[in-house]
Image: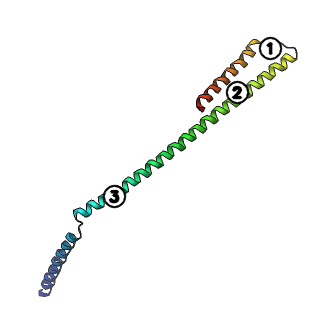
Amino acid sequence: MKRIFLASVILLVISIAVFAQQTTLESTNRPTSGQTKEEARDYLNQGRSFATQFDASQAELNTRNTSNNDMHTFNRLKDELDRLEAAITQEQNRRAASLDKGLKVEQDSIDSIQALIDQYKAKLAELEAFSR
C-alpha cells in the first residue's frame, strides 16, 4: 500500500512539473503583438496579390467568353445567309426554267422569292449591326 501511495505521489508531482513547464513554454512561444501585426500585413499583401491575379484571370475569361459568343453569332448568321442564298438561287432557277419553257409562273411564287430576298436583306442588316 505504501508503494502504491508513493507511486501516486511521485506521478502527481511529475504531472504538476510537466504542466508547469508546458504553461511556461506556451507563454514564451506566443508571438508578440508586433509579430502578429507583421504576419497580418504579410497575409494582407499576399491576399492583395491573389486578388490582382483573380481580377486578371476574370478579365481573360470575360474576353474569351465574348470571343466565343461573337464566333457563335457570326456562324449562326453566316449559316442563315447561306441557307437563304441557296433557297433564293434554287427558287429563281426553277422559275427561270419554267419561263424558259414558255410556262406562266404564278405571282405568289414570285412573291415568295421576294419574301426570301427580304429575309436575306434583314440578315445582312443584322450582320452589319453585329460587325460594328
Q: Which quadrant would the N terminus be assigned to in this image?
A: bottom left
Picture quadrant where residue 83 is located: top right
Q: CA distance from mark 3 to mark 2?
A: 61 Å
Q: Secondary structure at mark 3?
A: helix
The image shows residue 43, relative to residue 2, as above or below, that is above
Q: Secondary structure at mark 2?
A: helix
Residue type at mark 1 is: Val
Residue name at image x 87 percent, y 14 percent: 102
Q: Earlier in the sequence, mark 3 or mark 2?
A: 3
Q: Label for residue 5? A: none
Closer to the camera: disc 2 or disc 1?
Answer: 2
How many C-alpha atoms fall within 10 Å of the one at disc 3: few (<14), some, or many (≥20)? few
Residue name at image x 50 percent, y 46 percent: 61
The image shows residue 76, relative to residue 114, as above or below, that is below
Q: Which quadrant would the C terminus be assigned to in this image?
A: top right
Tell me residue 93's x, y (percent): 81, 23
Q: Earlier in the sequence, mark 3 or mark 1?
A: 3
Q: CA distance from mark 3 to mark 1?
A: 81 Å
In this view, the residue in front, 22 or 1, is 22
Q: How many marks?
A: 3
Tell me the residue that label 2 is attached to: 84
The image shows residue 42, relative to residue 77, as above or below, that is below
Residue type at mark 2 is: Leu
Residue name at image x 33 percent, y 58 percent: 43
Picture quadrant where residue 85 is located: top right
Q: Label for residue 105? A: 1
Q: Residue furthest bottom?
A: 3
Q: Label for residue 43? A: 3
Q: Earlier in the sequence, mark 2 or mark 1?
A: 2
Type of colouring: rainbow
Q: Image check: 14 left or right of 52?
A: left
Whether the residues at callouts 2 and 1 have beta carbons within 8 Å, the answer is no
